[in-house]
């Protein structure tokens, strides 16, 4: 960040102070004042640069740590599915597959639920209840991920195993085509359960963004739509949703970014198996769960480097998704 | 059925489904809290607070983990709070429409949602490997990285709520810029700044993944920041996944304590953040 002498005076413009600092011919300020200002601005800008440096540092440090594995396996690392610590052979395909599938399941469940909650809160909810219900949904975001893991493992997984999964196997499992996804034994833990837990965790984030972008729709548009005789659903479907399409996609991407990188909750319920199975109910692993489970047990340097390489892949994917999300939300809320 | 009544019914069904979605969200929250309450309260006892984590089959508590969590989160906040408030101030007060600042704010928001396990890996490669051992310092640093973007974002948002006329009045009196920020802007936004710090605490208090291979854990009481230190979330993780009944009970007790703390702080921070506007 540049803090040259010439900029120290003119850059000091707060959001509402443009013009003040740039005023020509103002009396010179005492040296002590100038020194204090410069030091303060330098300190605060230094802190801000630190944030940027950390993000860059994460990528650089992970890339350096992953180097031995990437050198050994080359680009094949990304699509090879062997994972054999005994033979020192590693490939990322199984964790990448698990990460993508669990996040996809989470989005399929969380997106309609979040939209439903946002619609309820903006259109239907009696005003006195709006705040308490909104806060309750937001509290879901405050619960730490390890608690979701505990709950998923001890409460949700048994329910999945005893009722939900057998029901899915008996119905959807017999369909041609997609039946493959619902075959096999009900283990309780596995990609489906992990997806459900991730859906619950992503829900408050998607709901919050959806509510915010719904609020940007001008009241006049809504009223005009009601005025020509549209029903509430038609107003949402044909006016509100098209108006905030970018923001809604941004909200979904934000939830996706969260789901992709979520660690502890998934580690409890994924089943930890480096195998790519067709069934959604099979135990699997994700990038973050592999790292959490195996990192302290990684005995060979190549093992450690391979896990760091997994971390690098994860951060590149999530940083990209989150960046895109942020950009879309920003574009949508500053009309 | 006439076209109009079909449209009305579609709308009614859609609205009903949105109510069902909301009910589902509330039921899940209630179910999680109920599980914690029913299993956690039963496991709470005075020993929790003065005995260390036991080997399986022996009476024990969570004292070392509670202490470790408290020390690491407080050290992390002591570092992250000043840095975060200063950085948020730079973005809100000293940037105007600068592109660099916009980029920094953007990257801060990416870091805000970055996977915490990746932060743990980063601190492992950047700090644990060079130091040659796991340590509470490394754990605290990874928590700093998680708390920092929360504080930066809240600070920036809260400072932008302070009316410009306050700043202009102060500058017109000949006050140096740093004095304007410290004595006028920060003071006006003090509740908001505190909210940010509390939210950061709530976020950091339950973090497990970044501590797994930075602070590691420790079965015994340890107050040396240069050695591995137990923390509540990591102990919950270890004990919950174990086959021992008494370990699982301790895990539920810890889970109850952690969630209660975080929810109370979350609600408190919200009350603080909104009390000024009403």
Image: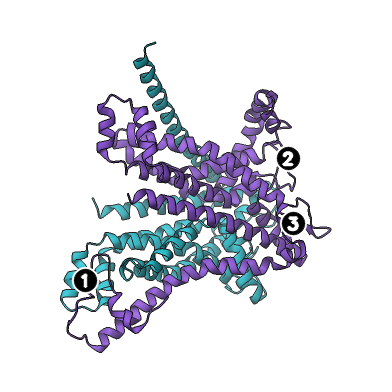
Chain colours: A purple, B cyan
Q: Residues within 10 Å of mark 1 (few under 14, many from 20)?
A: few
For this orientation, the residue located farthest to the bottom is A31
Asked if the residues shown at circle 1 and circle 3 are in contact, with their CB atoms under 8 angstroms apart, the answer is no
Whole-angstrom CA distance, mark 1 to mark 2, is 64 Å
User: Residue A79, position in %: x, y?
Assistant: 72, 52
For disc 1, the marked residue is A19
- Seen in the picture, residue A284 relative to B63 is either above or below; the reply is above
Left or right position of A245 against B60: left
- Seen in the picture, residue A8 relative to B128 is either above or below; the reply is below
Q: Nearer the viewer, residue A128 or B178?
A: B178
For disc 3, the marked residue is A76
Whole-angstrom CA distance, mark 1 to mark 3, is 57 Å
Q: Residue at x 50, y 52 (%)?
A: B257
Q: In which quarter of the view is residue A120 placed? A: top left
Say which of marks 1 and 2 sits in front: 1
> Does the rendering let one see residue B242?
no
Mark 1 falls on what kind of element?
A: loop
Q: Residues within 10 Å of mark 3 (few under 14, many from 20)?
A: some
Left or right position of B81 against A69: left
Q: Disc 3 sits on a residue from what chain?
A: A
For disc 2, the marked residue is A277
Q: Residue at x 20, y 73 (%)?
A: A20
Q: Nearer the viewer, residue B189 or A282?
A: A282
User: Residue B49, position in %: x, y?
Assistant: 54, 58
Q: Residue at x 37, y 60 (%)?
A: B154
> Does the rendering let one see residue A319?
yes
Q: Are labels 3 and 2 assigned to the same chain?
A: yes
Locate the N terminus of chain A and report the quarter of the image it occupies.
bottom left
Mark with earlier residue (3, 2): 3
Mark with earlier residue (1, 2): 1
Mark with earlier residue (1, 3): 1
Say which of marks 3 and 2 sits in front: 3
């Amino acid at each position: 960040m540049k803090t040259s002498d010439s900029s120290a005076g003119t850059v000091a413009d707060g959001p509402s102070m443009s013009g003040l600092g740039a005023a020509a011919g103002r009396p010179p300020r005492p040296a002590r004042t100038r020194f204090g200002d410069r030091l303060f601005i330098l300190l605060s800008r230094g802190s801000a640069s630190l944030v940027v440096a950390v993000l860059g540092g994460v990528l650089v440090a992970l890339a350096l740590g992953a180097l031995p594995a990437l050198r050994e396996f080359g680009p094949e690392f990304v699509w090879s599915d062997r994972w054999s610590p005994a033979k020192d052979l590693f490939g990322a395909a199984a964790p990448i597959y698990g990460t993508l599938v669990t996040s996809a399941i989470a989005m399929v469940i969380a997106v309609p639920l979040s939209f439903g909650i946002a619609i309820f809160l903006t259109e239907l909810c009696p005003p006195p209840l709006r705040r308490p219900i909104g806060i309750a949904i937001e509290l879901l975001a405050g619960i730490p991920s390890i608690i979701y893991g505990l709950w998923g493992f001890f409460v949700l997984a048994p329910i999945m195993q005893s009722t939900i999964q057998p029901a899915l196997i008996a119905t959807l499992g017999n369909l041609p085509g997609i039946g493959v996804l619902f075959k096999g034994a009900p283990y309780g833990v596995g990609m489906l359960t992990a997806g459900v837990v991730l859906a619950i965790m992503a829900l408050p984030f998607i709901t919050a963004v959806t509510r915010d972008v719904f609020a940007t729709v001008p009241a006049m548009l809504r009223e005009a739509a009601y005025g020509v005789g549209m029903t509430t659903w038609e107003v949402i479907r044909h006016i509100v949703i098209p108006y905030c399409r970018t923001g809604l996609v941004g909200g979904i991407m934000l939830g996706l970014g969260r789901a992709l990188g979520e660690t502890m909750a998934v580690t409890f319920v994924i089943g930890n198996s480096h195998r790519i199975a067709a069934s959604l109910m099979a135990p699997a692993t994700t990038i973050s769960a592999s790292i959490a489970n195996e990192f302290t047990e990684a005995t060979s340097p190549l093992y450690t480097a391979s896990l760091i390489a997994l971390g690098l892949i994860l951060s590149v994917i999530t940083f990209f998704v989150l960046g895109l999300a942020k950009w879309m939300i920003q574009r949508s809320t500053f009309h | 059925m006439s076209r109009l009544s079909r449209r009305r019914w579609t709308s009614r069904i859609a609205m009903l489904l949105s109510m069902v979605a909301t009910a589902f969200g509330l039921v899940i929250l209630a179910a999680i809290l109920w599980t914690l309450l029913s299993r956690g309260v039963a496991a709470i006892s005075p020993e929790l607070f003065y005995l260390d984590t036991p080997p399986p089959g022996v009476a024990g508590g969570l004292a070392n983990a509670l202490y470790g969590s408290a020390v690491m989160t407080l050290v992390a906040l002591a570092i992250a709070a000043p840095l975060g408030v200063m950085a948020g101030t730079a973005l809100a007060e000293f940037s105007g429409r600068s592109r660099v600042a916009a980029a920094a704010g953007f990257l801060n928001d990416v870091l805000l949602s970055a996977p915490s396990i990746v932060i743990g890996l980063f601190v492992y490669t950047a700090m644990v490997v060079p130091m040659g051992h796991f340590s509470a310092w490394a754990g605290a640093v990874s928590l700093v990285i998680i708390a920092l973007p929360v504080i930066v974002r809240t600070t920036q948002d809260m400072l932008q709520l302070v009316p410009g006329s306050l700043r202009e009045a102060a500058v017109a009196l000949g006050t140096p810029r740093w004095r304007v920020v410290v004595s006028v802007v920060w003071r006006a936004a003090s509740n908001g700044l505190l909210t940010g710090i509390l939210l950061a605490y709530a976020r950091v208090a339950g973090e497990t993944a970044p501590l797994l291979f930075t602070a590691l854990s420790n079965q015994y009481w340890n107050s040396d920041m240069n050695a591995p230190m137990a923390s509540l979330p990591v102990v919950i993780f270890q004990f919950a996944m174990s086959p021992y009944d008494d370990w699982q009970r301790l895990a539920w007790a810890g889970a109850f304590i952690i969630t209660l703390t975080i929810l109370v702080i979350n609600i408190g921070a919200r009350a603080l953040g909104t009390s000024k506007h009403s």
